[in-house]
Amino acid sequence: MKNYGQFCPIAKAAEIFCERWTALVLRNLGAGACRFNDIHRGVPHMSATLLSRRLRQLEAEGLVERRKSSSGRSWTYHLTGAGAEFLPLVGALAVWGQRWTRRDLEEGEIDLGLLIWGLEYSVDPAAFGQCRRVVKLEVTDQPENKRHYWFVCADGTLDLCVSDPGGETDLHLAASLPDLIRIYRGDLALGAALERGRLAADGPPKLLRRLPDWFNFGVMAKTPPAEGSPAKQAAPG
């Protein structure tokens, strides 16, 4: 990691936190990803070699600890107390980004894998109660082999399936990838997306009413753009 050659605590913290990818790796760990492949899915443009090196660096700095997996054949990664104290800084970056950075999506940012990863680690599987509920998501502008995803919610846990898990599907959601990203990010309110037909939702009314709870929008998504910011000027209609 880069050394600023200063004794200032801001400089010392920045040597760790401002290294490229570090904030996103901490974000992924804070979201609950602990296996290497799951952490990597949240930073798909980061090489596996670099992620491995960064995790070792964070471990050496005392922000991350490795533990043997339950099988004993692999490692899992977890934030230490020091690492967890970084999470409010990650959250503050998210809020600032919502308020001040541009909101239009460039082609390279319309990332299906990252959206599915984000939903997997943010939705609330307990929103529909403890009974097994299956939410099928159809990404309407994707090819058939990347179009359908099933979120199986049961007993407060979530399983993501890329093939039909069987049984009854309780809710069917359908939208284009850009609109799903806008909904997830908070640029397009869920109610507005439903009213305008940019998100189709089919299922029992009692479950449809719980969709906002299932999406589990966090502080970032609920933060509006600041007046006069590029984010506000580029807000989608």
Image (tube, rainbow, N blue to C red):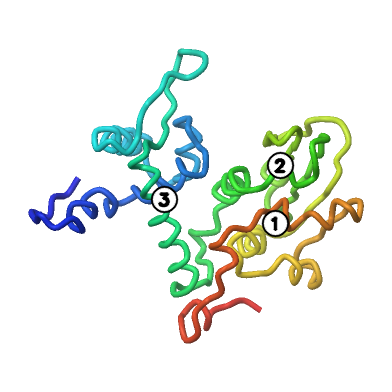
Amino acid beneath label 1: Asp
| Element under disc 1 | loop
Q: Amino acid at mark 2?
A: Pro
Residue at the outermost top position: 72
> What is the crowding at mark 1: few (fewer than 14 residues within 10 Å), some, or many (at least 20)?
few
Q: In x, y percent, where is residue 116?
A: 61, 46
Instruction: Give the percent coordinates (x, y) of residue 14.
Output: 23, 55
Q: Quadrant of residue 166?
A: top right
- Residues marked 1 and 3 touching at CB (< 8 Å): no
Q: Tell me whether the residue at label 3 lies in contact with that at label 2, contact meaning CB atoms closer than 8 angstroms.
A: no
133 versus 193 height, above or below = above
Q: Earlier in the sequence, mark 3 or mark 2?
A: 3
Crowd band around label 2 with a 10 angstrom C-alpha radius: few (<14), some (14–19), many (20+): many
Residue identified by numbered label 1:
141
Picture coordinates of residue 32 (x, y %)?
Answer: 52, 39
The quadrant in which residue 130 appears is top right
Instruction: Give the side of residue 10 with respect to residue 145, left or right.
Output: left
What residue sits right under mark 3 in the picture? 87
Q: Residue 106's spot in the image, x, y percent?
A: 50, 66
Categorize mark 3 by other alpha carbons within 10 Å: few (<14), some (14-19), many (20+): some
Position of residue 137 relative to residue 47, above or below, is below
**Side of 17 relative to 1 (left or right):** right
The amino acid type, in three-letter code, at marker 3 is: Leu
| SS assignment at label 3 | helix
- Which disc is residue 211 wearing? none
Separation of residues labelled 3 and 2 (CA atoms): 23 Å
In the rendered image, which residue does mark 2 sit on? 125
Q: CA distance from mark 2 to mark 1?
A: 26 Å
Is the N terminus in the top left, top right, bottom left or bottom right quadrant? top left
Q: Between residues 49 and 8, which one lies in front from this camera angle?
A: 8
Q: Point out the residue furthest to the bottom here.
A: 228
62 left or right, relative to 76: left
